[in-house]
Image (cartoon, grey):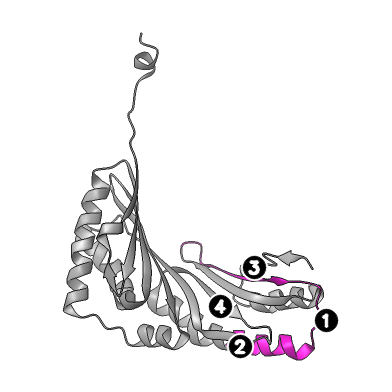
Amino acid sequence: MNNVTEISKYKSNTSHYEVLDQAIQKGLLFSTIEMEYKRGAKNFYTNGDGRKGFSLSASYYKHLEFQLDSIRNRIIIPIINKLNCSFVIVFEVSQKGEILSDHVKLSLQMECPKRLPYLETVEEVFNVLMPFTDYISNLEVNGHSRGLSYIRAEMNISREDLMDTILNPYVDEFIEKQWHDFGIIAYHEAKEQFSLNVRIPFTYGAFTWDTIEKSIRITQQETLKELMNI
């Protein structure tokens, strides 16, 4: 049987219906379902991964449709409305067509608005990400000499904890100070480099500074005369 790595991408809030229609035609047995929202373009995508060539009952796809309707209304729309950021969320699917709720992979990407002063920029970004501190596995920071571009948080979280964090965000003083200190360091690191990409692992809800992964770009500009040694 052939592997299907991606069966569909649609710019529509009803895209999972079209994905299921294609899955029925291909006899797709789902392994994961990925949903992505791009805030800037305001586009929403649904991708289905799995193996094709199976003879599956109509109830298999109907059950998936019911679950995806629930996910859209109870998870996707609240994330868009309350967090207002780009995200990718991946759900595992059992062979019986059950979308597993305990192991959800979520990536939240916050763009850093350039129109605002630094403190207002990080405050807007951190207010969204800080409540997820206990679940974050990695934090990626991208910036340049003019400041921060975006901050992306990757995490594993259950659907129950995800909804609870969205509806009842909580941040204690220790977490707030930790993020504030991190923001100052990241901002000054970015200002000193032409291009900066930092990946920070988290351990038990804390920044693991000693295992930070950093890549920078150093650029030197020359005129044509200098290059040709004229």
Labels 1, 2: front one: 1
Q: Amino acid at mark 3?
A: Tyr
Q: Is residue 214 left or right of residue 43?
A: left
Q: Residues within 10 Å of mark 3 (few under 14, many from 20)?
A: some
| Numbered mark located on residue 67 in the image | 2
**Which residue type carries mark 4?**
Phe
Q: What x and y, as percent, mark residue 36? A: 53, 69
Q: Earlier in the sequence, mark 1 or mark 2?
A: 1
Image quadrant where residue 94 sits = bottom right
Determine whether label 1 and label 2 are within 8 Å by CB: no
| In this rendering, position of residue 128 left or right of residue 8 | left
Residue on which the image places disc 1: 55
Q: Compared with residue 13, is residue 116 higher up or lower down, i.e. above or below?
A: above
Whole-number angstrom distance, CA of label 1 to CA of label 2: 21 Å
Q: Residues within 10 Å of mark 2 (few under 14, many from 20)?
A: some
Identify the amino acid type marked 1: Ser
Please name which of the two marks, 3 or 1, marks the residue nearer to the observer: 1
Residue 68 on the magenta segment:
yes
Residue at image coords 34%, 15% = 226
| Res 10 label | 3
Observer-side mark, 3 or 4, equals 4
Give the spatial CA distance, label 3 vs label 2.
Answer: 19 Å
Of badges 3 and 2, nearer the viewer stands 2
Residue at the farthest front position: 210
Q: Which mark is residue 91?
A: 4
Q: Which residues are magenta?
A: 40-69
